[in-house]
Image (tube, rainbow, N blue to C red):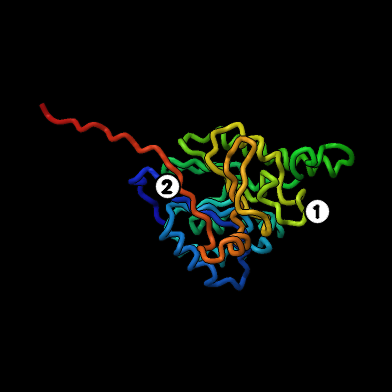
């Protein structure tokens, strides 16, 4: 992946997609997608479920597919990437292909700062699962709280003028509507929305809800984009299988030239 130059027009084009679910037989399946991203955008965000069952063999296939990408790429893992308990191996394999995987970390380039966590489940608003009762419920809720705290800490470290949030699970209910209501508690958590509202976030990207809605808004009017590939294919059948957002950034002030006396 090649580094990109500073934007000449003060706008950075961000491509985002999730739920690739790369398998051991996906050879050649994603190279056209990554080539199209390279021709369209200056940065790619991958919103989790990069692999189908979290196996290193699947990550190696995806790493080969990423050779078609010519712009920086940032990702978070999803629940499928955790399925086999080998997520650290996945991260190392994908890092070798130039992919930056965030887990409470940040990535900054071109005036854009990205805070990324996987996120977790638990539900939304007053119906969110509370930490009460059996210990297993408290452990479940603690995981959601910890992911929100990691996101808050990452946002606090960003120095860029524009902040983006990259998740796998949704922080709001709007973008999961379309899924069966019974699964709402398992596709996101409004605890993730709380830190987003405390920082100047320009946009949020997530996946996971294959049958949700492509767009929503937090209580603080921050746009949220569900970039699950199956959803994008259904909602925008005539468009590329990734979402593109143009983000304005401050132009660097040129240093004054110093002539000789």
Q: For residue 192, what is the image quadrant? A: top right
Q: With respect to residue 142, does 72 lie above or below? A: below
Please provide percent x and percent y for residue 32: 48, 68
Quadrant containing the C terminus in the rendered view: top left
- Residue that appears at 69% across and 52% down: 176
Q: With respect to residue 203, does 230 lie above or below? A: below
Q: Can the viewer see residue 56 in this picture? A: no
Q: Can the viewer see residue 108 in this picture? A: yes
Quadrant containing the N terminus in the rendered view: bottom left
Please provide percent x and percent y for residue 124: 74, 42
Label 1 sits on residue: 182
- Residue that appears at 62% across and 39% down: 151
| In the displayed structure image, the side of residue 13 where residue 226 appears, left or right | right
Of the numbered discs 2 and 1, the one sitting upstream in the chain is 2
Judged by depth in the image, the label closer to the viewer, 2 or 1, is: 1
Label 2 sits on residue: 12
- Residue that appears at 47% across and 51% down: 14
Total label count? 2
Please provide percent x and percent y for residue 203: 55, 43
Nearest the eye: 112 or 176:
176
């Amino acid at each position: 992946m090649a580094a990109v130059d500073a934007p000449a027009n003060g706008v950075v084009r961000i491509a985002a997609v999730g739920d690739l679910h790369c398998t051991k037989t996906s050879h050649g399946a994603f190279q056209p997608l990554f080539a199209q991203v390279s021709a369209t955008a200056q940065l790619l965000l991958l919103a989790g479920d990069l692999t189908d069952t979290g196996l290193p063999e699947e990550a190696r296939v995806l790493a080969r597919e990423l050779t078609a990408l010519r712009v920086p790429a940032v990702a978070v893992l999803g629940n499928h990437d955790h399925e086999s308990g080998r997520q650290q191996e996945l991260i190392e394999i994908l890092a070798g292909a130039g992919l930056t995987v965030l887990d409470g970390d940040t990535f900054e380039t071109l005036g854009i700062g990205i805070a990324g966590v996987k996120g977790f489940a638990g539900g939304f608003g007053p119906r969110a699962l509370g930490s009460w009762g059996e210990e297993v419920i408290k452990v479940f809720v603690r995981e959601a709280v910890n992911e929100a705290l990691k996101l808050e800490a990452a946002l606090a470290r960003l120095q860029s003028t524009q902040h983006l949030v990259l998740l796998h699970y949704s922080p709001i209910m709007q973008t999961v509507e379309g899924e069966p209501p019974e699964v709402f508690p398992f596709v996101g958590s409004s605890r993730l929305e709380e830190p987003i509202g405390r920082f100047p976030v320009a946009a949020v990207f997530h996946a996971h809800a294959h049958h949700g809605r492509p767009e929503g808004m937090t209580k603080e009017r921050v746009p949220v984009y569900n970039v699950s590939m199956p959803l994008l294919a259904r909602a925008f059948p005539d468009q590329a299988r990734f979402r593109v957002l143009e983000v304005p950034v401050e132009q660097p002030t040129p240093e004054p030239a110093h002539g000789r006396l």
